[in-house]
Image: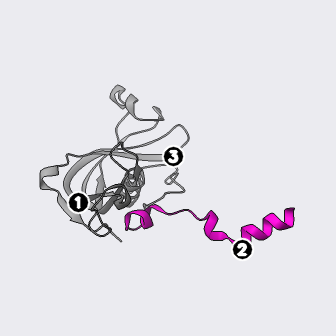
Amino acid sequence: MRFMLLTMACLCPAVFAQSTPGATFGTREPLACSDTKEPARGPLTAALATKYARCGREKVVRHSGGDLLYLMENAHFEVGKSRKYQTSDSLLSDIDPARPVYPIRGGFDLYSCSDPKQHSGMRLGANCRLNRNTQSDGVCYQTTFGDWKCEISYEADFRGAERDVPGPR
Protein backbone atom coordinates (compact mmCIF):
# COMPACT_ATOMS: atom_id res chain seq x y z
CA MET A 1 0.00 0.00 0.00
CA ARG A 2 2.80 2.44 0.89
CA PHE A 3 4.57 1.70 -2.39
CA MET A 4 1.40 2.41 -4.36
CA LEU A 5 0.83 5.78 -2.65
CA LEU A 6 4.45 6.78 -3.17
CA THR A 7 4.27 5.78 -6.83
CA MET A 8 1.06 7.78 -7.33
CA ALA A 9 2.60 10.84 -5.71
CA CYS A 10 5.65 10.61 -7.97
CA LEU A 11 3.70 9.97 -11.18
CA CYS A 12 1.06 12.67 -10.69
CA PRO A 13 2.73 15.85 -9.44
CA ALA A 14 0.23 18.04 -11.31
CA VAL A 15 -2.56 16.68 -9.12
CA PHE A 16 -0.80 18.08 -6.05
CA ALA A 17 0.47 21.34 -7.62
CA GLN A 18 -0.97 24.65 -6.44
CA SER A 19 -1.35 27.74 -8.57
CA THR A 20 0.85 30.58 -7.35
CA PRO A 21 -0.45 34.14 -6.92
CA GLY A 22 1.79 35.36 -9.75
CA ALA A 23 0.39 32.80 -12.18
CA THR A 24 -3.21 33.46 -11.12
CA PHE A 25 -2.91 37.25 -11.52
CA GLY A 26 -0.37 37.29 -14.40
CA THR A 27 2.30 39.07 -12.32
CA ARG A 28 5.47 38.44 -10.43
CA GLU A 29 5.19 36.72 -7.07
CA PRO A 30 4.67 38.85 -3.95
CA LEU A 31 7.82 39.51 -1.96
CA ALA A 32 8.09 37.11 0.95
CA CYS A 33 10.39 37.84 3.87
CA SER A 34 11.46 34.66 5.59
CA ASP A 35 13.69 36.53 8.06
CA THR A 36 12.70 39.89 9.52
CA LYS A 37 15.07 39.97 12.49
CA GLU A 38 17.84 42.15 11.00
CA PRO A 39 19.17 44.32 12.42
CA ALA A 40 19.11 42.68 15.83
CA ARG A 41 20.31 45.95 17.42
CA GLY A 42 20.36 49.55 16.35
CA PRO A 43 18.47 51.36 13.62
CA LEU A 44 17.38 49.70 10.43
CA THR A 45 18.57 50.88 7.04
CA ALA A 46 16.41 52.49 4.37
CA ALA A 47 16.83 49.35 2.26
CA LEU A 48 15.50 47.14 5.06
CA ALA A 49 12.64 49.53 5.80
CA THR A 50 11.65 49.40 2.13
CA LYS A 51 11.89 45.61 2.09
CA TYR A 52 9.83 45.19 5.28
CA ALA A 53 7.18 47.66 4.06
CA ARG A 54 6.86 45.67 0.84
CA CYS A 55 6.68 42.34 2.69
CA GLY A 56 3.86 43.65 4.86
CA ARG A 57 1.85 44.98 1.91
CA GLU A 58 2.43 42.49 -0.92
CA LYS A 59 -0.20 39.78 -0.57
CA VAL A 60 -3.53 38.44 -1.76
CA VAL A 61 -6.50 39.92 0.06
CA ARG A 62 -9.87 38.19 -0.07
CA HIS A 63 -12.81 40.50 -0.76
CA SER A 64 -16.47 39.73 -1.32
CA GLY A 65 -16.09 41.19 -4.82
CA GLY A 66 -13.12 38.95 -5.64
CA ASP A 67 -9.51 38.45 -4.67
CA LEU A 68 -6.96 41.25 -5.06
CA LEU A 69 -3.19 40.91 -5.23
CA TYR A 70 -1.28 43.96 -4.00
CA LEU A 71 2.25 44.56 -5.28
CA MET A 72 4.61 47.50 -4.73
CA GLU A 73 7.08 48.76 -7.30
CA ASN A 74 9.56 51.64 -7.24
CA ALA A 75 9.36 51.67 -3.44
CA HIS A 76 11.78 53.89 -1.56
CA PHE A 77 11.69 54.89 2.08
CA GLU A 78 13.97 56.86 4.31
CA VAL A 79 14.27 56.24 8.03
CA GLY A 80 14.04 59.06 10.56
CA LYS A 81 15.48 59.40 14.03
CA SER A 82 14.09 56.90 16.53
CA ARG A 83 11.55 57.86 19.16
CA LYS A 84 10.15 56.20 22.26
CA TYR A 85 6.98 54.15 22.28
CA GLN A 86 3.79 56.26 22.53
CA THR A 87 0.32 55.15 23.59
CA SER A 88 -0.89 55.70 20.01
CA ASP A 89 1.50 52.88 19.01
CA SER A 90 -0.61 50.38 20.98
CA LEU A 91 -2.65 49.74 17.82
CA LEU A 92 0.41 48.19 16.15
CA SER A 93 0.31 44.42 16.38
CA ASP A 94 2.86 42.79 18.67
CA ILE A 95 4.85 46.00 19.21
CA ASP A 96 7.53 45.80 21.87
CA PRO A 97 7.05 48.98 23.93
CA ALA A 98 10.59 48.70 25.31
CA ARG A 99 12.15 49.23 21.86
CA PRO A 100 12.39 52.41 19.80
CA VAL A 101 10.03 53.22 16.94
CA TYR A 102 11.40 54.61 13.66
CA PRO A 103 9.37 56.95 11.46
CA ILE A 104 9.64 56.36 7.72
CA ARG A 105 8.57 58.31 4.67
CA GLY A 106 8.82 57.76 0.95
CA GLY A 107 6.83 56.66 -2.03
CA PHE A 108 5.85 53.69 -4.15
CA ASP A 109 3.65 52.50 -6.96
CA LEU A 110 0.86 50.24 -5.73
CA TYR A 111 -0.65 47.69 -8.10
CA SER A 112 -3.96 46.10 -7.17
CA CYS A 113 -4.64 43.19 -9.48
CA SER A 114 -7.88 41.26 -9.83
CA ASP A 115 -8.19 37.58 -10.64
CA PRO A 116 -9.56 37.55 -14.22
CA LYS A 117 -11.30 34.23 -13.58
CA GLN A 118 -13.51 35.97 -11.01
CA HIS A 119 -14.62 38.77 -13.39
CA SER A 120 -16.24 38.24 -16.77
CA GLY A 121 -14.65 40.18 -19.59
CA MET A 122 -11.36 40.70 -17.74
CA ARG A 123 -8.14 39.28 -19.13
CA LEU A 124 -4.58 38.78 -17.90
CA GLY A 125 -2.41 41.72 -18.82
CA ALA A 126 -5.25 44.21 -18.29
CA ASN A 127 -6.38 43.20 -14.81
CA CYS A 128 -4.51 45.68 -12.60
CA ARG A 129 -4.85 49.24 -11.34
CA LEU A 130 -1.84 51.39 -10.65
CA ASN A 131 -1.81 54.10 -7.97
CA ARG A 132 1.32 56.21 -7.73
CA ASN A 133 1.97 57.21 -4.13
CA THR A 134 4.66 59.85 -4.02
CA GLN A 135 4.15 60.80 -0.38
CA SER A 136 3.51 58.18 2.24
CA ASP A 137 4.67 57.76 5.78
CA GLY A 138 4.59 55.24 8.57
CA VAL A 139 6.66 53.57 11.24
CA CYS A 140 8.95 50.61 11.64
CA TYR A 141 9.12 48.78 14.94
CA GLN A 142 10.15 45.50 16.49
CA THR A 143 7.68 42.98 17.79
CA THR A 144 7.89 41.18 21.11
CA PHE A 145 9.53 38.34 19.14
CA GLY A 146 12.25 40.61 17.73
CA ASP A 147 10.85 40.76 14.19
CA TRP A 148 10.70 44.07 12.32
CA LYS A 149 7.43 45.37 10.88
CA CYS A 150 6.93 48.51 8.83
CA GLU A 151 3.43 49.93 8.58
CA ILE A 152 2.74 52.60 5.99
CA SER A 153 -0.17 54.91 5.36
CA TYR A 154 -1.02 56.62 2.13
CA GLU A 155 -3.90 58.20 0.31
CA ALA A 156 -4.91 56.41 -2.84
CA ASP A 157 -6.64 58.60 -5.39
CA PHE A 158 -8.71 56.05 -7.26
CA ARG A 159 -9.82 58.73 -9.74
CA GLY A 160 -6.20 59.14 -10.77
CA ALA A 161 -5.48 55.42 -10.94
CA GLU A 162 -4.32 53.93 -14.20
CA ARG A 163 -6.77 51.15 -15.03
CA ASP A 164 -6.51 47.95 -17.06
CA VAL A 165 -2.71 47.84 -16.89
CA PRO A 166 -0.50 44.75 -16.73
CA GLY A 167 0.93 43.88 -13.35
CA PRO A 168 4.65 43.97 -12.67
CA ARG A 169 6.63 40.94 -13.77
Q: Secondary structure at mark 1?
A: strand
Q: Nearer the viewer, residue 162 or 151?
A: 162
Question: Of callouts 3 and 1, which one flags the residue occurring earlier in the amino acid sequence?
Answer: 1
Magenta span: predominant SS is helix
Of the numbered discs 3 and 2, the one sitting upstream in the chain is 2
Residue 2 horizontal/vertical position (percent): 86, 62
User: Which residue extends farthest front?
Assistant: 120
Magenta stretch: includes residue 58: no
Q: Amino acid at mark 3?
A: Asp
Residue furthest toward the top? 87
The residue beneath circle 3 is 147
In the rendered image, the vertical position of residue 167 relative to residue 142, given as above or below: below
- 75 vs 87, nearest the viewer: 75
Residue extending furthest bottom?
11
Which span is picked out in magenta?
A: 1-28
Q: What is the three-letter code of the residue carrying label 2?
A: Leu
**Mark 1 and mark 2: Cα distance apart in space:** 42 Å
Q: Position of residue 5 (x, y in %)?
A: 79, 64
- On the image, which quarter does residue 130 sit in? bottom left
Question: Is residue 25 a member of the stretch shown in magenta?
Answer: yes
Residue under the point 50% across and 49% down: 41
Residue at 21 percent of width and 56 percent of height: 131
Q: In this figure, which residue is indicated by the disc labeled 1?
A: 130
Asked if the residue at tag 2 contacts the one at tag 3, i.e. Cβ–Cβ closer than 8 Å, the answer is no
Q: Residue at x 36, y 42 (%)?
A: 64
Callout 1 crowding tier (Cα within 10 Å): few <14, some 14–19, many ≥20: many
Taking 158 as reference, is 21 left or right? right
